Amino acid sequence: MRGPFATMTHPGSSDTLAIYAGGKVNFPIKQLSSGIDFTHAIRIPGEPIHLFIQKTWWSGWNCDLDMVFQGEPPIVLMKHNKVSGQLPAGWDINFDDHAIEVVDHEGAPILQVIQDRDYDVYVNTVTSNGPNGVAIMKGSKVGFKRKDSLSPQDLPKVLFKYPSEPNRGVRQ
């Protein structure tokens, strides 16, 4: 949501927020004041990622992010901008003011949510898709592969340094 004088100070700015998550979906910026549930806009079977974003001109961004890992109940990764949650053993999470990333025990990015510019949000993920398959989403593209045929080129590029504890918010 913009302040009351936004159109006067930035007359050419966009009136939409775009989420790139296996496609591109636009939402009216005005809808951000009450919040947008992006869960159905993220085009992965089974909806393993639940993302809710709210923004007001007086209080800023408010994000909630949950993820379902391998059929388990959802894990709360972020609630009201506070990062939390119990990840599977050996996994790690790192973040800054514009991105959050979860890596698995091998350091491969499993989930990235990135705010680019004011009103673009990118969701990159690699999630289970059946017993032997994975769904790979990188921005507006989505694909499916067998787990055993994944290559480093299929995965999103790691954003942060790990382990996260001594490297909180430090980008690669």
Image (cartoon, rainbow, N blue to C red):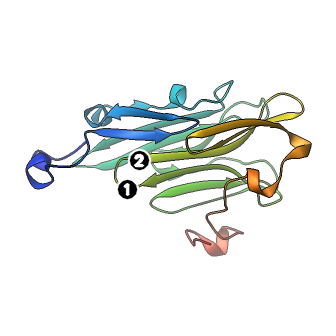
Counting from the top left corner in percent of width and height, residue 70 is at 79, 34
Question: Residue at 58% across / 71% down in the picture?
Answer: 171
In the image: residue 79, left or right of residue 126: left
In the image: residue 133, left or right of residue 122: right
Q: Which residue is mark 1?
A: 117
Q: Secondary structure at mark 2?
A: strand
Residue 35 in sight from this viewpoint? no
Question: Residue at 55% across / 68% down in the picture?
Answer: 169
Q: Which residue is mark 2?
A: 120
The residue nearer to you, when weighing 170 against 76, is 170
On the image, which quarter does residue 117 sit in?
bottom left
Counting from the top left corner in percent of width and height, residue 136 is at 71, 41
Question: Residue at 67% across / 33% down in the picture?
Answer: 74
Question: Residue at 45% across / 44% down in the picture?
Answer: 63
Residue type at mark 1 is Arg
**Label 1: few (<14), some (14–19) or many (≥20) C-alpha neighbours in 10 Å:** few
Q: Secondary structure at mark 1?
A: loop
Counting from the top left corner in percent of width and height, residue 102 is at 67, 53
| Quadrant including the N terminus | top left
The answer to whether mark 2 and mark 1 are in CB contact below 8 A is yes
Counting from the top left corner in percent of width and height, residue 29 is at 28, 37
User: Considering only vertical position in the picture, is 63 above or below 156?
Assistant: above
The residue nearer to you, when weighing 82 against 10, is 10
**Label 2: few (<14), some (14–19) or many (≥20) C-alpha neighbours in 10 Å:** some
